[in-house]
Amino acid sequence: MADSATAVATAAQDEERISVASQRQLIWWRFRKHKLAMVGAIVVLLFYLVALFADFLSTSDPHASEGQRSLMPPQQVHWFDGGFSPHVYAVRGERDPITLQRTYVVDPTQKIPVTLFAKGYEYEFLGLFTTDIHLIGTEGARAEDTLFLFGTDQQGRDIFSRLIHATRTSMLIGLAGVALSILLGVVLGGISGYYGGAADTVIQRTIEILRSIPTIPLWMGLAAAMPKDWSVNQVYFALTLILSVIGWTELGRVVRGRMMQIRSEDFVTAAELVGGRPRRIIFKHMVPLFASHIIAATTLALPLMIVAETSLSFLGLGLRPPAISWGVMLQQAQNVQAVALYPWMLLPVLPVVAVILAFNFLGDGLRDAADPYDL
């Protein structure tokens, strides 16, 4: 009896708590029940923290090259030496007299300690001040010459540091592209669905034209149209703009359909009768009704933007060196020889897969939380 009374009291408390909770609280309570979505949110947050503190987390200057250490395999970190003492051994390059291929030999007599908060190359920390402190470094030697956790590429550049800086580029281009495409989709889709008539016809025909253009020829034409003397920042901005202009069409149609569905509701009519301006009615009264769908669409569109940038850069149609992105790094792993002999060149695939899965889990959780009253 006591257990039944306790269960009834608990149910009553939960019902009262739900009845007075805000919509944001209800969505959060449902979202945190989705374990994979919570894991995805944590992974996405970690990726953006890496993007934010890329210089601090790097061990070497990502642009520093040295032909004498080309295609060096990843170094093994040794954690104990008569106690906890992280260190790596020096590596010496040699030329094979038969194949003339450069090989690397570990020299166990030269132990290089690995330390936290070590000094390295200088950089601007969040654009605030200049510093040379890095999370990981070496003691008594330059990290650029001695520490290669993920090996080096064909130009002898540290893959670990380049991978961290590539995370910044690929994650931010997805965020900027989705933000612009969401803005275009909501604004143009809202205008199309609310006003109808000529505005709806023009916007819908524009969407159909954009969706009918073959993707690969379009990217090839855009790549050829970009001036070769453009800086990395100009190409970055142009690629973001192009991805956004093409990526808003699906959301625009969804917003249009929802607008047409609810524009005849009583609350919209009441807002019009009291003199509400169309812009206020759209963004203040109508858009919040499907804000959860927009949030879910955003989290699902982000991985598509990241994959698009990676694929285009991999094919040579997007960002180009000296820009650093996951796609640019994968350009050096386009042949079977690289995959067979230098498998560490494929390491940029891992963060791409991880962030895509994380965003998909996050999007699924937000989509399930769109009905917050089902707790």
Image (tube, helix red, strand yellow):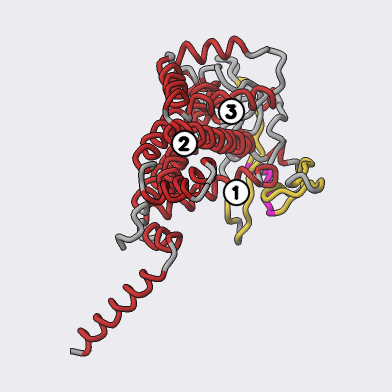
Q: Crowding near pointer 1: few (<14 within 10 Å), some, many (20+)?
A: few
- Residue 74 seen in render: no
- For label 2, the SS is helix
Q: Taking 2 as reference, is 37 left or right?
A: right
Residue 76 percent location from the top left of the image: 56, 43
Q: Earlier in the sequence, mark 2 or mark 1?
A: 1
Q: Which residues are magenta?
A: 108-116
Q: Which mark is residue 190?
A: 2
Task: Indicate yes or no whether the magenta region holds residue 137.
Answer: no
Is 44 in front, or is 93? 44
Read off the residue under disc 3. Answer: 240
Sequence-first tag of 3 and 1: 1
| Secondary structure under the numbered disc 1 in the rendered image | helix
Horizontal and vertical percent position of residue 270: 43, 50
Q: Residues within 10 Å of mark 3 (few under 14, many from 20)?
A: many
Above or below for 272 versus 154: below
Q: What residue does disc 1 label?
A: 49
**Nearest-to-viewer mark from 3 and 2:** 2
Answer with mark 3 or mark 2, whichever residue precedes in sequence. Answer: 2
Q: Is residue 103 above or below residue 190?
A: above
Q: Quadrant of residue 88?
A: top right
Q: Amino acid at mark 2?
A: Gly
